Amino acid sequence: MAAKPVAKPFENDYGDFSQFKKGKAVNQTLGEYVYLQYLLVSGIYMLEPWEQKLFNWILIFAATTFGAIIAFFVV
């Protein structure tokens, strides 16, 4: 009966991952964390930089317009 080969640590079907070193944890500011979450949740991290700027501009314009309309009619 053949012995079952013993897997190295961090080895799976895709290969041996023990050659990769773990990176140091990077300290983030609250603003960086919130911006990263915004990119991930909205999915705009997949867009090109000019598309991100256009998307952000449209979003800010819509929010500002909405706020102005509320301020004009309610206040």
Image (cartoon, rainbow, N blue to C red):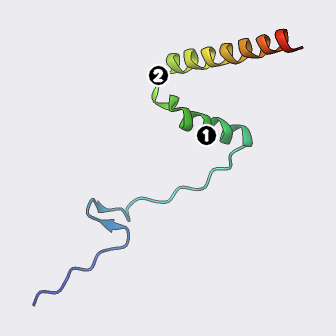
> x, y percentage for residue 9?
37, 73
Q: Residue furthest bottom?
A: 1
Left-right relation of 5 to 61? left
- Nearer the N terminus, badge 2 or badge 1? 1
* Quadrant of the image containing the N terminus: bottom left
Q: Residue furthest right?
A: 75
Hey, which quadrant is residue 53 in on the image? top right
Which label number is shown at residue 52?
none
| Mark 2 and mark 1: Cα distance apart in space | 18 Å
> x, y percentage for residue 16?
31, 64
Left-right relation of 56 to 46? right
* Quadrant of the image containing the C terminus: top right
Which label number is shown at residue 37?
1
Residue depth check, mark 2 versus mark 1: number of the one nearer the observer: 1
Residue occupied by mark 2: 48
Q: Please report the residue visible at 32 percent of the width from the left and 67 percent of the height from the top.
A: 11
Q: Residue furthest front?
A: 74
